[in-house]
Amino acid sequence: LAKTTQPISMDSYEGQEVNITCSHNNIATNDYITWYQQFPSQGPRFIIQGYKTKVTNEVASLFIPADRKSSTLSLPRVSLSDTAVYYCLVGASGGSYIPTFGRGTSLIVHP
Amino acid sequence: EPEVTQTPSHQVTQMGQEVILRCVPISNHLYFYWYRQILGQKVEFLVSFYNNEISEKSEIFDDQFSVERPDGSNFTLKIRSTKLEDSAMYFCASSEAQFEARSGANVLTFGAGSRLTVL
C-alpha cells in the first residue's frame, strides 16, 4: 500500500486558491489517486480522482506530474465552507484495496 | 444523488451492553465497509464485506465485532459487549467495486455516521 505524506495543516483566506500537495513515492503502476474531504462529525466525501496529468471537476482540480510520485489538489477561490480536513489516498493495485486514511490536511479558511 | 444512510445518528449505551449500528448502502454497490473515528483521531478501517462475507478486517475488528447483511438492503455492525474505548463515530461506506483499479470504481461513499457513546 502506497504511503502518503501531506502537510498537517494549512491556512488560507476567502477567495484565494489553495493547493495541497501529497507525496506518494512508492505509488504502483495501477494505483489511482483519490482525494476526500471531511467536515467535523461527518463522513469523508469524495472530491476527485485521477491517474495522471490533470483532472478537473466542478469542485477541484488534481495535478499529477509524469512520475506520479506526488499530486496536488487545487481548490479555486475557497470560501469559509471549504474549512475541512482533506485526505489523499492511493489505491493498491491487484488483490484487495482498502482505502486507508492518514491524518490528512486540516485546511482553515479565514474571512 | 444516491446516499448511504445510517441509524441511529447517536446512541448512548452502558459498558457491557450490545449495540447494533445499521446502514443502508447505495443499492447498486457491491462492497460495504465500516470505519470508525475516535474523537480527534484518524478514520480507521474496521471491516469490508462482499458477497455476504467478510473480505478484509483490521486488528481492531476482534471477536466483539460482527457484521451482517440480514436482507437485501441493510448492513449492520454489532458490538457484543461495549467498552469505554468503543466510543467513536462509526461510518458505513459502500463502493461499486474494490479490486478493479478503474477510475471511480473504488470510490467510497460514506454515510453521515453513528456516534456511539459508551458510559
Image: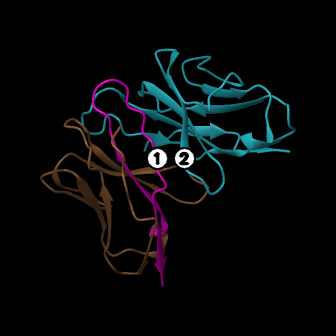
Chain colours: A brown, B cyan
> Observer-nearest residue: A80 or A67?
A67
Residue A69, percent from left and from top: 22, 52
| In this picture, residue B17 sits left or right of residue B9 | right
Tags 1 and 2 on a common chain: no
Q: Is residue A42 or residue A5 the one in the foreground? A: A5
The answer to whether residue B70 is magenta is no
Q: Secondary structure at mark 1?
A: loop
- Is there a contact, CB below 8 Å, between mark 1 and mark 2? yes
Vertical side of B11 occupied by B77: above or below: above
Q: Position of residue A13 (x, y in %)?
A: 41, 82
Residue that appears at 46% across and 50% down: A102
Mark 2 residue type:
Val
User: At x 35% / y 35%, what residue is drawn?
Assistant: B106
Q: Which residue is mark 1?
A: A101
Image position, residue A73 (x, y; %)? 30, 61
Amino acid under disc 1: Phe
Looking at the rendering, in which quadrant would you find the C terminus of chain B?
top right
- Badge 1 crowding class, 10 Å Cα cut-off, few under 14, some 14 to 19, many 20 or more, is some
**Within the image, what quadrant is residue B96 found in?**
top left
- The Cα atoms of the two marked residues, 1 and 2, are separated by 6 Å
Q: Is residue A107 highlighted in magenta?
A: yes
Q: Looking at the image, which is closer to me, B60 or A58?
A: B60
Q: Which residue is mark 2?
A: B43
- Can you say whether B60 is above or below A24 in the image? above
Q: Which residues are drawn in magenta? A: A82-111
- Name the foreground residue: B61 vs B7: B61
Secondary element at tag 2: strand
Q: Which quarter of the rendered picture does the N terminus of chain B lie within?
A: top left
* Residue at (55, 30) in percent of width and height: B58
